[in-house]
Amino acid sequence: MYKAGLLVSAIIFSTATADPYITSKHVFSYKNSDYNDTTNHVRLGNSWTTQSGLKLHAELGVAEKIDKDEDWFDGNAGKSYQFGFQKDLTSRFAVNGKYEGFEANDEEKSQKFEVITKFKF
């Protein structure tokens, strides 16, 4: 398994250009117009574009979920990650996808997978 991972990594890195970055994300949750919580993410990321034009990205970092009555740094901290792709299938049609997750130290986990299509007129 280790050798297969190295081989896949070598292929991706040899056929792509990489661009490292840092990102932050702040999610404010509401239910029935009432504020519930905030989740703040800080991640280090890298993006690649393969020779075929497939754009890939990976982000890893930390996050804190702060409930309505909590202060900063009193919330539930944990790992934050996102992996995604973007591909222009034609000059007018593109597809994006991403898998994103948050794993708190108290075993709370949330993940989502999102696919977006875009057609230009």
Image (tube, rainbow, N blue to C red):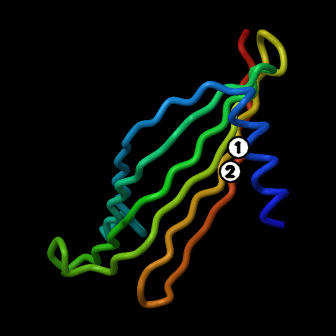
Describe residue 121's horizontal placement relative to residue 52 as left or right: left
Element marked by disc 2: strand
**The quadrant where residue 109 appears:** bottom right
Describe residue 116's horizontal placement relative to residue 78 as left or right: right
In the image, what residue type sits under mark 2? Answer: Glu
Q: Residues within 10 Å of mark 1 (few under 14, many from 20)?
A: some
Q: Please say if the residues under marks 2 and 1 sit with CB atoms less than 8 Å apart.
A: yes
Q: Residues within 10 Å of mark 2 (few under 14, many from 20)?
A: few
Marks 2 and 1 sit apart, C-alpha to C-alpha, by 6 Å
Q: Residue at x 15, y 75 (%)?
A: 71
In the image, what residue type sits under mark 1? Answer: Gly
Residue 51 position within the rendered picture, expressed as x and y whole percent measured from the top left = 77, 19
Residue 101 position within the rendered picture, expressed as x and y whole percent measured from the top left = 56, 65
Q: Relative to 73, does residue 114 appear above or below in the rendering?
A: above
Q: Which residue is mark 1?
A: 97
Give the quadrant of the N terminus.
Answer: bottom right
Element marked by disc 1: strand
Q: Residue at x 78, y 64 (%)?
A: 2
Residue 93 position within the rendered picture, expressed as x and y whole percent measured from the top left = 79, 19
Q: Residue at x 25, y 76 (%)?
A: 68
Q: Relative to 60, does residue 46 appear above or below in the rendering?
A: above
Give the farthest residue toward the front.
3
The dot on residue 114 is 2
